[in-house]
Amino acid sequence: MATFMRHNTTVVTCGAGGILNYGSFPAPNRTTKWIDRQARAYSDDRRRRDVAVRMYEMRFGEEPPPGASIERLRQLEGARMKALYRSLAAKNRVKPFKRNYNPHDWDDQDPVNKALSASNAALYGVVHSVLAHLGCHPALGFIHSGKQDAFVYDIADLYKARTTIPLAFSLSRTANPEQEARLRLRRDLKLYRLIPQIVRDVQTLLSLDDPEEAVSEEEPPSSGGPWQVVDLWDPVVGAVSGGVNYANHIADSEEP
């Protein structure tokens, strides 16, 4: 562990194939750039709505009606998901489907719901691992709220329609749908291959006010300059470099 930390490596404990997430150990020298952006957007209602709208666009490939409220976005999302469920139920010859998750009554769940719950849990693990690496906080969601994994749910929803949901319907006649779902995600879909896309999408969502900042990884320190260990907060410019003696910026007349 000391070697990992010394080399600025985030350590994530996860299940086989990258699915599920049991915990992480962020490297102490990781930048706070993305959690700073996340916190600013989360705490500003306008920015939070902008992120929610962009999530809708990413998820469904279309813009919502101009000026649509968050309530309207929920309604549109619900209609799109109902249509998807109907289409997949017809394709897989499944009776009309209703999403139902009840961990206290697991044995009585139908196969599609079991497979969907198991595969979604796997997807959440992959997303959670990416957020840990970027240094984002999983609880600061833009659509979901009130849970420690709210932001995980936000991001995972971007991919369910092309990964976990079709898979779950295809397993409607299997004897052990939850086990088969996890196996298929590891073996066939190779869910971990989503990681580069998740990184790009998270960084894009947190850079709506400055799209040029949505790069795929932290940039190395500029050549010839000092290693930037930490930033100092500034209410005017946002942040200034740490490790600098700012006495040099004081006018001669102001020196004590």
Image (cartoon, grey):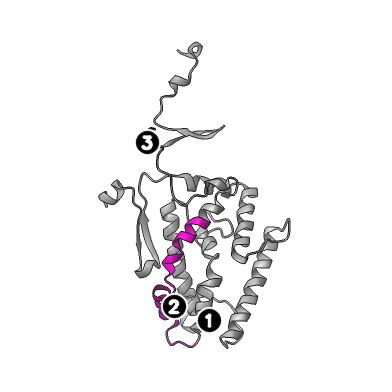
What residue is shown at x 44% (from left), y 33% (from top)? Answer: 241
x and y, in percent, of residue 165 in the image: 53, 75
* Residue 64 visible: yes
Instruction: From this view, report whether residue 54 is shown above or below residue 7.
Output: below
Q: Secondary structure at mark 2?
A: helix
Query: CA gap, disc 2 to disc 3?
Result: 46 Å
Depicted 11 relative to depicted 251: above or below: below
Magenta part, dominant SS: helix
Q: Which mark is residue 178?
A: none
Identify the residue position indicated by label 2 in the image.
181
Which amino acid type corresponds to the residue marked 1 in the rendered image?
Answer: Phe
Mark positioned earlier in the residue sequence (1 or 3): 1
Mark closest to the chain's N terminus, 2 or 1: 1
Q: Which residue is mark 1?
A: 169
Instruction: Tell me the amino acid under the disc marked 2.
Output: Ala
CA gap between label 2 and label 1 equals 10 Å
Q: Which of these two is toward me, 43 or 10?
A: 10
Q: Earlier in the sequence, mark 2 or mark 3?
A: 2
Q: CA distance from mark 1 to mark 3?
A: 52 Å
Is disc 1 surrounded by few (<14), some (14 to 19) or many (20+) residues within 10 Å?
A: many
Q: Position of residue 169 (x, y in %)?
A: 53, 81
Q: Which mark is residue 227?
A: 3
Q: Quadrant of the C terminus?
A: top left
**Left or right: where does residue 199 sit relative to residue 144?**
left
- Is residue 101 something one can see in this rendering? no
Part of the protein shown in magenta: 173-201
Mark 2 and mark 3 residues within 8 Å of each other at the beta carbon: no
The answer to the question of whether label 2 and label 1 lie on touching residues, with beta carbons closer than 8 A, is no
Q: Residue at x 52, y 61 (%)?
A: 155
Are the residues tagged 1 and 3 within 8 Å (C-beta)?
A: no
Q: Amino acid at mark 3?
A: Trp
Quadrant of the rendered image containing residue 182: bottom left
